[in-house]
């Protein structure tokens, strides 16, 4: 019976970075993202400032460069997903890094000659290389990381990616602009980064192919459609992919406005634009790392609605802040002067906050897609996600140009994005109420209580088991559900099941309402049938054998219903105990619950799990004794 990570095991970002199963891959992808953006921005600066012999305008060349880089994601992502499912992944990564060295050598010749066609070819090939690396980048993580490390791994990858985008963008512009030797220095830097990335990739441990017998399709368009269908098979995964794609739409729309925000609204020079990009990237990095802390090692999808709320609220405030500055006369204000203006700090705080909440939004979605995807199709599903994200980013660029031509100002674009983001969030959470349910659980457990957990490793990660716990308050099920990654089917009194607000949580979690045989024998029999069906399907079922919430704080006698359940489906039983909830707003101390607010807010509670009891030894009496021992003297 597999169990979760033992409580004493240490898991942190620094531990992951030192581990060979993650560290070499982390640095390989970081260097790749850095090189991508250094090269791309060096080419864009070269084009934008007319440092080539092309007859095309600089504006045309810059837009052409963006299109050339994004096109390979549509053409090759499907094939890249197939390759990542068919072949061992560390070999693919090393081959892609060798390809990167060759592409940078081609780019070096283009830089030396100021040859526009050759630079565009290198840019297309670099896009193709990135498209090939994309499915491997995310599908290799579940093979090398434990489930409880997925959020931390994704947080590090996403945070580092945005840092790499920032550094690459700055370095590309600085190096290529150096007098006389700038393009040559930029070329040498890209080759050096590619070579270091290849050296790092040689230490990545093997990741076996999940589908070695897969046949590679030759038609990229047919394979693209097939890949998207793979992504659509699991509804929650597909909607998570749409959420990821929306994040890139949101980010692309915002980032595209930074140059005009810096010049037109703030009256700043290029350094101010760079500062805006820096604070936004730092915010996302902070959000990714904070997400791992708040998740507690779990894939906490309750953070996704939290992130979407922040993305809308701070985009709205950014509109208000930028609109208030819209009358500022233009000029060439530098970073020091910009930071000296108190009115600008609100705008900086908005950009950092948008980045932080963006991290809360994207990291759990990435981990969820990796965790819930069929391992044999995982790379192709991620490839489908990359295709859809690329499409959303192209649509963001088209929409931004269209709205600007229609007369929208930069602040109005921020307002438009805030409103549309709120609409998209409501739509997704209506389709997948699990996100909103986990958000409510997250808020209850992290704002009203401080929960200390012990013995969670006794609850199996796979297979059926019955969990039994004392019944202290109306939120017992919420506290228990927040402690585990696995979904739990709760059996609860039908009156508690119908509690306002909490009813949404219980229904979404597929809780099973039950009544006593005296009150409603049909409901009781139906509940026992549903429990047997859930256990036969390998699910976790949690019951409160007391049958009602305590009115004294002490345990009520356990009823024999647990024995009836085990007689039908003999499975291990895990005794659990909650303590510290007695006297809180949701308990019945001093009268009916939920009548006197602000009782025991932010109080410390404890949740303890004991060793599993075999079904043959699990009687109502022995289980009550076990739960009582776990609870101790604190009620």
Image (cartoon, helix red, strand yellow):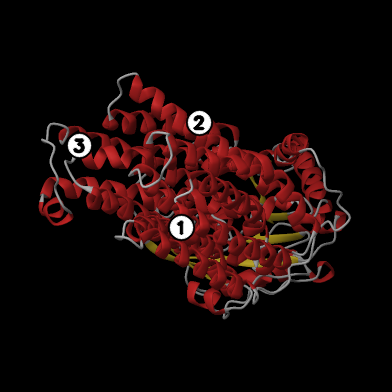
215 to the left or right of 552:
right
Identify the residue at horizontal 12%, vertical 41% (top origin): 331
Q: Nearer the viewer, mark 3 or mark 1?
A: 1
* Depth check, front residue: 552 or 568: 568
Label 2 secondary element: helix
Residue that numbered label 1 is attached to: 112
- Mark 3, other Cα within 10 Å: few <14 / some 14–19 / many ≥20: many
CB-based contact (under 8 Å), mark 1 and mark 2: no
Q: Is residue 233 left or right of residue 438?
A: right
Q: Which of these two is toward me, 33 or 69?
A: 69
Give 108 or 597, whichever is nearer the viewer: 108
Instruction: Give the Cα separation between the discs numbered 3 and 2.
Output: 25 Å
The local crowd at label 1, few if under 14, some if 14 to 19, many if 20 or more residues have their Cα within 10 Å, is few
Residue reaching furthest to the top = 406
Q: Position of residue 603 (x, y in %)?
A: 38, 62
Q: Residue at x 37, y 39 (%)?
A: 256
Q: Which residue bears the numbered disc 3?
A: 265
Left or right of 332? Residue 424 is right
Q: Nearer the viewer, residue 65 or 457?
A: 65
Calculate the distance from the C-alpha at mark 1 to the C-alpha at mark 2. 34 Å
| Nearer mark to the viewer, of 1 and 2 | 1
Q: Earlier in the sequence, mark 3 or mark 1?
A: 1
Q: In the image, is residue 574 above or below residue 111? A: below
| SS assignment at label 3 | helix
Which residue is denoted by mark 2 in the rendering? 395
Residue 256 appears in view: yes
Earlier-in-chain disc, 3 versus 2 = 3
Q: Earlier in the sequence, mark 1 or mark 2?
A: 1
Image coords of residue 258 (percent x, y): 31, 42
Badge 1 marks a residue whose secondary structure is helix
Residue at image position (55%, 37%) is 504
Contact flag, marks 3 and 1 (Cβ < 8 Å):
no
């Amino acid at each position: 019976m597999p169990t979760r990570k033992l409580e004493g095991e240490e898991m942190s970002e620094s531990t992951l970075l030192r581990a060979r199963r993650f560290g070499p891959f982390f640095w390989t992808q970081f260097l790749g993202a850095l090189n991508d953006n250094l090269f791309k921005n060096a080419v864009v600066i070269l084009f934008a400032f007319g440092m080539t012999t092309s007859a095309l305008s600089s504006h045309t060349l810059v837009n052409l460069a963006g299109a050339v880089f994004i096109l390979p994601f549509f053409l090759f992502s499907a094939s890249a997903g197939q390759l990542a499912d068919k072949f061992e992944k560390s070999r693919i990564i090393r081959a892609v890094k060798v390809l990167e060295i060759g592409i940078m050598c081609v780019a070096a010749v283009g830089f030396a000659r100021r040859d526009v066609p050759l630079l565009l070819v290198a840019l297309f090939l670099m896009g193709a290389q990135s498209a090939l690396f994309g499915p491997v980048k995310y599908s290799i993580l579940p093979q090398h990381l434990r489930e409880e490390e997925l959020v931390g791994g994704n947080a590090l990858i996403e945070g580092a990616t945005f840092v790499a985008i920032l550094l690459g963008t700055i370095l590309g512009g600085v190096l290529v602009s150096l007098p006389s030797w700038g393009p040559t220095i930029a070329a040498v830097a890209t080759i050096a980064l590619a070579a270091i990335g290849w050296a790092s990739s040689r230490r990545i441990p093997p990741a076996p192919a999940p589908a070695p017998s897969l046949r590679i399709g030759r038609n990229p368009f047919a394979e693209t459609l097939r890949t998207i269908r793979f992504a659509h098979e699991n509804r929650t995964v597909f909607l998570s992919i749409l959420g990821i794609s929306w994040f890139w739409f949101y980010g692309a729309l915002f980032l595209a406005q930074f140059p005009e925000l810096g010049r037109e609204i703030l009256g700043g020079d290029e350094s101010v634009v760079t500062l805006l990009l820096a604070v936004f990237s730092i915010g996302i990095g902070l959000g990714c790392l904070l997400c791992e802390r708040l998740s507690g090692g779990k894939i906490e999808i309750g953070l996704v609605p939290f992130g979407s709320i922040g993305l809308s609220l701070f985009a709205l405030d950014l509109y208000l802040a930028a609109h208030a500055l819209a009358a500022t006369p233009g000029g060439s204000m530098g970073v020091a002067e910009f930071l000296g203006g108190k009115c600008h700090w609100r705008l900086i705080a908005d950009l950092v906050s948008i980045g932080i909440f963006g991290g809360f939004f994207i990291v759990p979605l990435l981990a969820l897609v990796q965790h819930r995807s069929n391992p044999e199709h995982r790379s192709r599903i991620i490839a489908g996600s990359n295709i859809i994200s690329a499409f959303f980013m192209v649509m963001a660029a088209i929409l931004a140009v269209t709205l600007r031509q229609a007369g929208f100002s930069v602040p109005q674009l921020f307002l438009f994005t805030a409103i549309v983001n709120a609409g998209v969030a409501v739509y997704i959470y209506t389709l997948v109420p699990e996100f909103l349910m986990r958000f409510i659980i997250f808020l209850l457990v992290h704002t009203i209580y401080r929960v200390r957990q012990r013995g969670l490793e006794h609850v199996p990660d796979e297979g059926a088991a019955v969990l039994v716990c004392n019944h202290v308050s109306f939120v017992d099920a919420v506290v228990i559900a927040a402690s585990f990654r696995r979904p739990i089917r709760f059996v609860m009194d039908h009156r508690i099941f119908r509690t306002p607000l909490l009813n949404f949580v219980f229904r979404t979690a597929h809780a099973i309402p039950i009544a006593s045989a005296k009150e409603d024998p049909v409901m009781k029999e139906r509940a026992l049938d549903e429990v047997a069906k859930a256990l036969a399907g390998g699910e976790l079922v949690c019951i409160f054998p007391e049958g009602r919430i305590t009115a004294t704080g002490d345990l009520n006698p356990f009823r024999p219903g647990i024995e009836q359940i085990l007689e039908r489906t003999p499975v291990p039983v895990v005794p659990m105990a909650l303590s510290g909830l007695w006297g809180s707003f949701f308990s019945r101390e001093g009268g009916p619950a939920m009548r006197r607010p602000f009782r025991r807010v932010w109080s410390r509670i404890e949740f303890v799990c004991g060793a599993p009891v075999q079904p043959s030894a699990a009687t109502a009496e022995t289980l009550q004794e076990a739960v009582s021992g776990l609870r101790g003297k604190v009620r």
